[in-house]
Amino acid sequence: MGILVYGGDTATAARVVAAADGRLLSAGGWAETVIAVSEDPDFVNKLYRAGASLVFRADGAVGCSGALPTASKDQATS
């Protein structure tokens, strides 16, 4: 799941993602946002605890980010 994170400015949003153990994909489509992903089901809560002001699902943004898809556990063992 892709997440759009607003944290006050782009640098702060990137630090919030790092503090929440997420992976930064790119700057978001809106000013002062970033797109991030994580496999952690508690990622959104971690983002808010790390200081994110606003968090949105951004699944469509991940598809056009240029990030390489990751293999699922089933694909990795095949």
Image: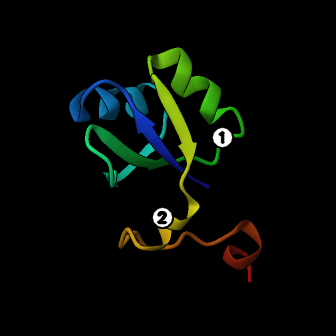
For badge 2, the amino acid type reads: Val
**Residue found farthest to the bottom:** 78
Looking at marks 2 and 1 on the same chain, the residue that comes earlier in the sequence is marked by 1
In the picture of the structure, the residue carrying the numbered disc 2 is 62
- The answer to whether one can see residue 20 in this image is no
For badge 1, the amino acid type reads: Asp
- The answer to whether one can see residue 27 in this image is yes
Labelled disc at residue 40: 1
- SS state under label 1: loop
* Residue 15, quarter of picture: top left
The x and y percentages for residue 49 are: 54, 15
Q: Residues within 10 Å of mark 2 (few under 14, many from 20)?
A: many
Labelled disc at residue 68: none
Query: Colour scheme used in the picture?
Result: rainbow
**Residue found farthest to the front:** 30
The x and y percentages for residue 8 are: 30, 24
Image height check: is 62 above or below 27? below
Image height check: is 32 above or below 16? below
The x and y percentages for residue 24 are: 37, 47
Q: What quarter of the picture does the N terminus occupy?
A: bottom right
**Is 22 or 1 nearer to us in this picture?**
1
Question: Residue at the location (40% across, 69% down)?
Answer: 67
The x and y percentages for residue 32 are: 27, 37
Q: What quarter of the picture does the C terminus occupy?
A: bottom right
